[in-house]
Amino acid sequence: MSKAKLFVCIIEKEEKLEEVLEGLVEIGVTGASIVDVRGMFEYLADEIPIFAGFRNLIEDKNPTNKMIISVMKDDKTVKEAMNTIEEIYGSFETPNSGIMFSIDLTDIRGLKI
Amino acid sequence: MKLTPFLSSEKIFVEFNAKNKLNFFSKCVDIVVKDHPDFDREEVLELFLRREETMSTGIGKGVAIPHIVYHKCRAHEIYVFKLKSEIDFNSLDGRPVRFLFVVIGNATKSNLIHLQILAKLARMLRKDQFLKQLFEANSVDEILEIIKRYE
């Protein structure tokens, strides 16, 4: 099986995105996709009228979050990426700050890693 | 990634005189070519000017990071200039430039080192304390010391 991992990171504080990406480049991660995403709770509050009252409960008024998706060569790179991101962004232990995880990849095409 | 392997005190200049952006690049390239006699002065100057046409490398807060890859360059180098007087650089925030980190690299397939140097500089320059100390520094040794402290 390939050692490659799919790394996914979703951050709430969009203003930190540029610095997070700079940090990833610094450790040698230069390939990733950046996607605008909306959390389920935000979607409910903004799109489904019955849940509209929940908008006031969301501290972050920004309606979207940023998702970074990257195929990384191994677990060591993933750990380094996670540490770098937390160093820049702050701990992910803080509620509603964001999430990150990685999963094993088996078959990959179109990418040299 | 640390910046000091690409730097040396001989490549740091304080109280550097430049009348304007073009004059800066002209004088900067003279220094680079003096260090590398095999470089073609006009080619290097053209690369810097062409890069500026795409978008100014004045990233704001009085700092610019002009950067090129040049086929005759064998290893990455950073030249640092603190100008005697600010010059207009069409910076992103409209402010004149006083401090320049000039990066010259060798062309590789991934340009990874080039990207890493730019990312490192960009992150360091986000720190207000780093900038403040750089702007207050008056000697080559001081500047080198500050960079070492924050890299």
Image (spheres, helix red, strand yellow):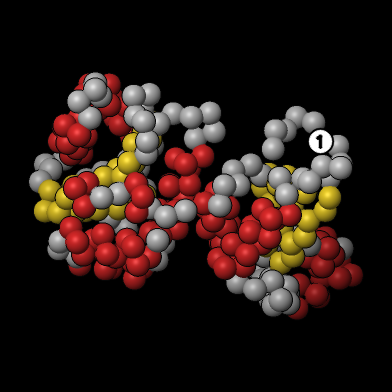
Relative image position of residue B67 (x, y in whole percent): 35, 38
Q: Say above or below: B45 vs B95.
A: above
Relative image position of residue A69 (x, y in whole percent): 72, 49
Q: In which quarter of the image is the C terminus of chain A?
A: top right
Of A6 and B87, which appears nearest the observer? A6
Q: Quadrant of the N terminus of chain A?
A: top right
Q: Is residue A37 left or right of residue B140?
A: right
Of B42 and B110, which appears nearest the observer? B110
Q: Say above or below: B149 vs B86.
A: below
Q: In which quarter of the image is residue B23?
A: top left
Q: Is residue A96 left or right of residue B54?
A: right
Q: In this orientation, does residue A82 appear?
A: yes
Q: In this view, does A36 lie to the left or right of B120?
A: right
| Secondary structure found at label 1 | loop
Instruction: Give the residue number, with chain letter if any, for mark 1.
Output: A108
Of A73 and A49, which appears nearest the observer? A73
Q: Which residue is drawn at 89% across and 70% down?
A: A50
Three-letter code for the amino acid on which mark 1 is drawn: Ile
Q: Residue at x 22, y 46 (%)?
A: B11
- Classify 10 Å Cα crowding around label 1: few (below 14), some (14-19), many (20 and above): few
- Number of dots carrying numbers: 1
Find the residue positioned furthest to the right: A50
Relative image position of residue B62 (x, y in whole percent): 27, 55
Q: In this orientation, does residue A66 appear?
A: no
Q: In which quarter of the image is residue B25?
A: top left
Q: Which residue is drawn at 38% across and 24% down?
A: B71
Q: Say above or below: B77 vs A109.
A: below
Chain for mark 1? Answer: A
